[in-house]
Amino acid sequence: MRKIFLLPARFWMALFFAAPLAIVCAYSFLTRGDYGGVELPWVLENFTRLADPLYLAILWRSVWIASLATVFCALLGFPLALFISRAGRRKNLYLQLVLLPFWTSFLIRTYAWIFILRDTGLVNTVLMRLHLIAAPLQLLYNDGAVLLGLVYNFLPFFVLPMYATLERLDPALLEAAADLGARPFATLRRVILPVSAPGLVAGSVLVFIPCLGAYLTPDLLGGGKSVMLGNLVQNQFTTARDWPFGSAASLALMLASALLLAGLMRSRIARELM
Amino acid sequence: MTRRTLLAAAAATVSCARDRRPRLNVYNWSTYIDPGMLTRFESERGVRLLYGTYESNEEMLAKVIGGNSGWDVVFPTHSRLAPMARNGLLASLDHARLPALRNLDARFRSPAWDPGLRWGVPYMWNGTGIVYNGAQTPAPQSWAGLWNPNLRGRMTMLDDPEDAIGACLLKLGYPFGSVDERQLQQAKAAAIAQKQLLRAYLNADVRDQLVSGDVIEAQLWSTTAAQAIQGNAKLGFAYPEEGYPLYCDCAAILRESKRYDLAHEFLEFLLRPDVAAANARVAETATANGPAQSMLPRDPVLYPQDAIYRRGIWPTALPSAVQRYRDRLWTEIKSA
């Protein structure tokens, strides 16, 4: 009986996940058509090209920026989740507020940041009116702006799993810690953090992986001055018209994410706590 | 109700639901036609138009390359006409069915990219130049104006390898469509040097920042430039002296089309001066239709005078290997 109920989900995954993935896989071994598309013969060249230092540097940059974004999400998201989990009756209100940005399109929210950060934007106008700066600061089109956009967009993905773990945290544990003489910081380090590790891991993965493949944020807030892996893939499918190489690059991205996940699953903390 | 009347009623319902009018499938750039003109063609001819839009030549080519896309009329940029024709994707035009070709501006009656107009009817065109804020800087004469150290952080280039690398080549005195490795390497070095001075690589997004005064100089298409100038009268547009690229989108009939006659009627309709003028008004760009031009305001940005027009370069499609080489250079520039 259970199998029957699983059928729609299986069908859905086969049609919209496995089949497109198989197509991307096949494309990555084919040859570039002159006007887009793919042609025979089958080749390995698209993967060997990825070993080029130019593309490895882009991969490294993407990993670095995605890592930074994850760290910032954790630094902001952990206290926020802890606060919400202990907010009593207001919990639901705060959770709604965390989810509120999702009511508007990702694209529009990113454009809104352009209006906030640009020379004649909100931040610069306020700072200049207060005579704190004489000339506008260049806030837009640099790595800082990209990082800001990524942290802003993916923070809820960290807060929600973090909240789910912290919410289940038994208050008796905290009382016990206090009774045994632990100061607040010791309680955080030795009781709350170990117990909430699964949420920390889940939240970090949910932030890191989409950041690794991000292309809109680096494009809009980075002004096309820095390339991340997602931009490389996008460019191969548009102006460069090199679908096979774009497919190979996106497969490499997927493989990196899958390896990371597998590594986490097998790690000691995951086995102990999940 | 007998079985027979039931069947008759069912058949009637089905035939009502199905539109019996002949249908033409037109695939065009977005905001590139006056929707009122589409309904006018439908009611005049008693036909139905299925109208779809795309955002880039690549998007359109990806659809029609297989030869069974279902589209009849497409609007490739001039440089794509020859390669598309070589690949057997286009039907040649029958001039006997297109008497209104005489309405074309003299510049477009037998263009270098398609002598004798075998493959496409020139539709709309525009060039790439430099928008500048006249209150902050004098009009740049040359592409070198986009390397101005005094405007550090206040200049942008197009996020487009053909235009951006092309401008570097022109600045160095090389051809826009260079295939020479040494010249392209020098262009890359110039682009990387310029990157330190640039605010960003932006396409249409730069328009608002030009209007607000954030950006003082930008490499931009004349169409988008004309829109920015409408928003801020201090802005001006310069066509650099080394030359500049021109692009013309052309209406072409796909060889796969089974509605060759109707497609010609549609192209003939687009060549009517009032129709062309209405479409140019919506697209806010320059029309290739002579009589239509005189029905529109004569904007010197959209319609450069002859002396300037002659400096324009019509880019041709690059060989595949060069294209790939340039794409790699572009990635190197972007990640430098």
Image (cartoon, coloured by chain):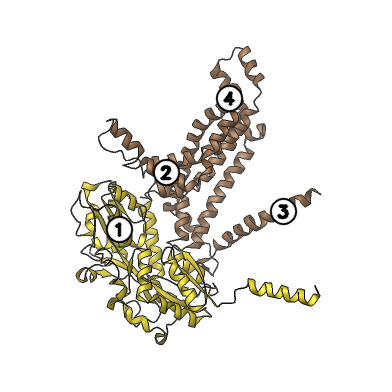
Chain colours: A brown, B yellow
Q: Position of residue B126 (x, y in %)?
A: 32, 66
**Label 1 sits on residue:** B225
Q: Position of residue B161 (x, y in %)?
A: 36, 60
The chain letter under disc 2 is: A
Q: Amino acid at mark 3?
A: Pro
Q: Secondary structure at mark 2?
A: helix
Mark 3 vs mark 2: tell me if same chain: yes
**Label 3 sits on residue:** A8
Quadrant assignment for the N terminus of chain B:
bottom right
Q: Secondary structure at mark 3?
A: helix
Depth check: B6 or A96 in front?
B6
**Label 4 sits on residue:** A87
Q: Amino acid at mark 2?
A: Ala
**Label 2 sits on residue:** A112
Would you call the spot at circle 1 few (<14 residues within 10 Å), some (14-19), or many (20 or more)?
many
How far apart are labels 3 and 1 at the CA level?
52 Å
